[in-house]
Amino acid sequence: MNSPPENFQALCYKEDIEAVTRTVGLAGYQLLDLHDYLGQGTALVGVLDAFWDPRGYITPAEWREFCNPIVPLAWITNRIWTTTNTFSARLGVAHFGPIPVTNLVVKWSLSESTANLPIASGEFFAWAIRLGKETNLCTIAVPLKNVHVPAKYIFKVQFFELREPNQFTKAHPWNKRTLVAQNHWPIWIYPAEIDTNVPPNVFLTQDWCEAEKHLIAGDRVIFVPPIHMLNWWCPPLDPVPIFWNRQMNPQWNRMLGLLCNKSHPALALFPTEEYYEWQWSELVSRCRAINIGQLKSPVTPIVLAIDDWNRNWRLAPIFEARVANGRLLVCSFDIINQLDNRPVARQLRKSLVTYAASRDFNPKSNISLDELRPLWFNNFTMKLLRAQVIPPEAGLLMDGNPNTAWQARFSQTNLTNQQKVTYIGIQVP
């Protein structure tokens, strides 16, 4: 359980440091600490442990790609692309070494993460890299029409110094070049169009009552609970990990990363590592994970959201089980709405429905309907009752969101001699 949050943390360090490094006018940055801090509730933020020993999730060479006197930079507008797009990146460099560097060859490549040969590559000669930041070495453009999809790709940039100046040609011997710096960025490319229709032997729904009927009838069901229909013990997820710890900054959402069973056939058409990467961010930002710790029966999730160590709930955005006479696949990621504009959600839906229709859909866990029903709870009951509160801003007390609150002493309404009243707008039997 340590590895996925650590990989997630490394991605965040890289993004933060590169964002500062790319920004013109910022002369540098300071990392508050490089090792885990055990005071004030504990902050497990370090690339080193509390004893200043490496935690092992990132090597010095990997760290130096983005934290070094010379750092290759890329301005990439998106991490998610489709086959109708042309991938583009503007290359630059941050150079805070002692002297300018001359006679550099800049080499770039775009490769599928599981392949050795790039689908596109190039190199050019840079006469000199001055001290400071160069934000426009060149712009790369690669049409994606005929690439293999869906897949994760790596965009890589390397700086080589020529040992024999002024002899740059594409045939120049590589043994006459010295690697000065390199950096890389993952991107994900998806098909521009994909069949998201549900096969006839699978029933996909957001209505639990309908799901129950089909499970009792022995059908294959994919249930996608609406975000407002999960009980309070099913918290939202975050596209970035918690800051410091949740003792110092209490919040409902406390995700530290994802643990993905990438070899599971449910994810066969959805490229992923075993940990959270940026293609998950769009899915996570509109998701509440299901707290399977509320179930009496053991369940092994397909995707597990790793909770803050102070709470340590078992949170599963995707899991499966045999229920009643049927087979159930639960996905709390939104794979229903606005799919035309969401290639990642579209691809996850394709992967899940293909799996649910196949012979591989054979859950090992058994869960009763009585165990599952308490998970679903309408958070908007007070809104359905058309309830109103005086003063109006006190409505935060009943909006179904534990992260919102109201304090009378900060009220914008004059509460002198005023009753605090709740009105129910419909007749209650």
Image: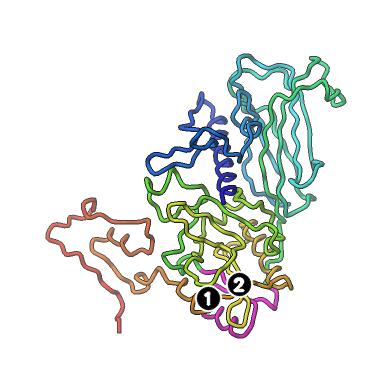
Whole-Å distance between the Cαs marked 2 and 1?
A: 22 Å
Residue 383 located within the stretch drawn in magenta? no
* Quadrant in the picture for residue 182: top right
Which badge, 2 or 1, comes first in the chain's sequence? Answer: 1
Q: Compared to 269, does 145 lie above or below? A: above
Q: Compared to 23, does 246 lie above or below? A: below
Front residue of 65/90: it is 65
Q: Residue at x 71, y 39 (%)?
A: 155
Q: Residue at x 62, y 38 (%)?
A: 58
> Residue furthest toward the left?
417
Front residue of 397/342: it is 397
Q: Compared to 300, does 203 lie above or below? A: below
Left or right side of 105 for 230:
left
Q: Compared to 215, does 355 lie above or below? A: above
Q: Which residues are magenta?
A: 199-225
Q: Amino acid at mark 2?
A: Ser
Q: Pointer 2: what residue?
A: 365
Asked if marks 2 and 1 touch (Cβ < 8 Å), the reply is no
Give neighbour class at mark 1: few <14, some 14-19, many 20+ (Cα, 10 Å): few
